[in-house]
Every structure is written in structure tokens, then in C-alpha cells.
Image (tube, rainbow, N blue to C red):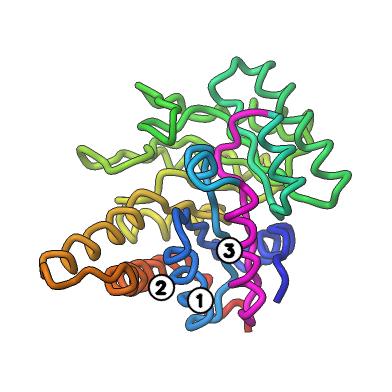
Amino acid sequence: MPLVTSKEMLLKAQQGGYAVGAFNAENMEMVKAIIQAAEELKAPVMIQTTPSTIKYGTLETYQAIVAAEAAKASVPVCLHLDHGSSFDLAMKALKAGYTSVMIDGSKLDYEGNIEVSKKVADVAASMGIPCEAELGKVGGKEDDLVAVADTNTDTQEAREFVERTGVTSLAVAIGTAHGFYVGTPVLDKERLSEIRAVVDIPLVLHGASGLSDEDVMDCVKRGICKVNFATELRAAYSKAVRETLEDEKVFDPKAYGKAGIAAVKELVMARMKVCGCDGKAR
């Protein structure tokens, strides 16, 4: 089917007590793997690209790949700009045909974050496209953004932020980090429950690669409606490619591309089941 926005799938997740899996794709093979997993499990799915991925392949290229694969699928597929780094990039994504955008103003001060988030949300709303924002700082590294320390989302600021910006979903910081964890993450789950109590739009969990299944499921029970997975997909794809290329007779890119697809598909299916979105597109 044609690409859809994230609005309906996230609201259904919020009402149904599960989360939609949002998976970052770097190439055609990863797009195919993610959609194949969604088809097999009958799950709604969001495919995401970050600014560095876009710089590598362009908005138009990724939109064309995802749209072509989604057209062959029976499940809803949304194409999302992840960690949009500027108003300009968000506008370009909307123009290119992305069906959901994120503006990440978390590197700015509170008022600056509100200003840029509202600006993007207003334009997106006029086009019928949902807009995600982030409040607080998720640790680790995502693209060119590095947070040396976590600054968890303030509950009352979250309520005011949503009211003043008009964003349709909110990524919250509760102790997760981008990339792989060095130690065992300590999540402020009570903070998540407090935010859920005062914010009525879907909440998003970033930095889920490396979290235990139990932690993800607990966060979903406490109100998370969208869970982002990126680093572990890249690692699974690269591992499969390296293992295939150990055979020096392999020279056809399709051979290791197929191996990468299989590895990513398996991982995505496992994560969808943890999020509880399997079977929700029936």
C-alpha cells in the first residue's frame, strides 16, 4: 500500500497498550528486511533515516526505495525523518514525501527547543504530517549529536512543551543512550510514568538498541508507543556481510546483501514481538 503517516498507527498503539517498532535503514537491503519482517508478522512499521544517512543517499533516494517496497506490502509503512537537525532539513523531508518528521531541538535551551519544534510542527500539521520532538537529552551518540551526560526529561516541562509546540509525539529521556551501552543502563521508569500521566500524546523511546526485552516491555506498559532501533540493526547487517565475505570466492554483492537481509529481518521480527506490535496490522 502507499506510504502512510505515523498518526493512526501511534494512536492505535497508545490505545492498545503496545508500541510501534521504528527501525533505521541505511540501504535498500535493510529496507527490504524491515518490510519483510512487518509483512510476516502483520505489524505496522516505521522506517527511519537520520541526517547522516540522508547525506549519504539523499532524501529522494530513500523515499523512492521505501515507497516502492511499501507499495508491494499489505501492512502500513511510514517513512520518518529521525533526529531532524534543522527546520530546513525537516521541510526538505516533507517536500520529498516523508510521511512523518522529527525535529530534534534537544541540543538547544528549553525556549529554543520550543521555538524550532513549534515551527516545524505548524508546517507539518498544515500538510497533515505528524511531528515528533525531543525534550531532555538522550545520552550517547546519534549521528553528529553527542550527549556526554543524560539529562532526563522534566515532567512539568514536558506538559508545557507539548501544549506550546503542538507536536504529535514526544521522545523522552529516561536514562537510555544512543549506540551500544558500556554498562547496564539504569532507567528512570517512574519518571516515564509521571510524564505519561500529564502528557496525552504518544511517547517515544530512543536508544533502545542493547536494552533488555524486559526493560523495553516495561517501558511500553508505562506508556511508550514508539521504540527506536538503529545501532543493533547496523551491527547485525555488518556482521552477516563480514561472515559471508570470509569465503574469498564470494564476489557478488547480492550474496552478502541477502545475508544482511536475513540477519536484519530476524532481529526486526524479534524486536517487533517485544514491542507487542505483531499482529496489529491484521
**Structural distance between the alpha carbons of marks 3 and 2:** 21 Å
User: Which amino acid, by three-letter code, is at mark 1?
Assistant: Asp
How many neighbours does mark 2 have within 10 angstroms: few (below 14), some (14-19), or many (20 or more)?
Answer: many
What's the amino acid at mark 3? Ile
Determine which residue is flagged by label 1.
278
In x, y percent, where is residue 32? 48, 71
- Give residue 206's position: percent from left, percent from top: 47, 44
Q: Is residue 71 magenta?
A: yes
Residue stretch in magenta:
59-86
Given residues 25 and 148, the one toward you in this image is 25
Q: Which residue is mark 2?
A: 269
Name the residue located 27 percent from the left edge and 57 percent from the top edge.
238
Q: Circle 3 is placed at which residue position? A: 65
Residue shown at 43%/63% (left/top)? 30
Residue 49 in the image: above or below residue 87: below
Q: First in sequence: mark 3 or mark 1?
A: 3
Q: Quadrant of the N terminus?
A: bottom right
Q: In this orientation, which residue lies closer to the viewer: 239 or 279? A: 239
Q: Are marks 1 and 2 in contact (CB under 8 Å)?
A: yes
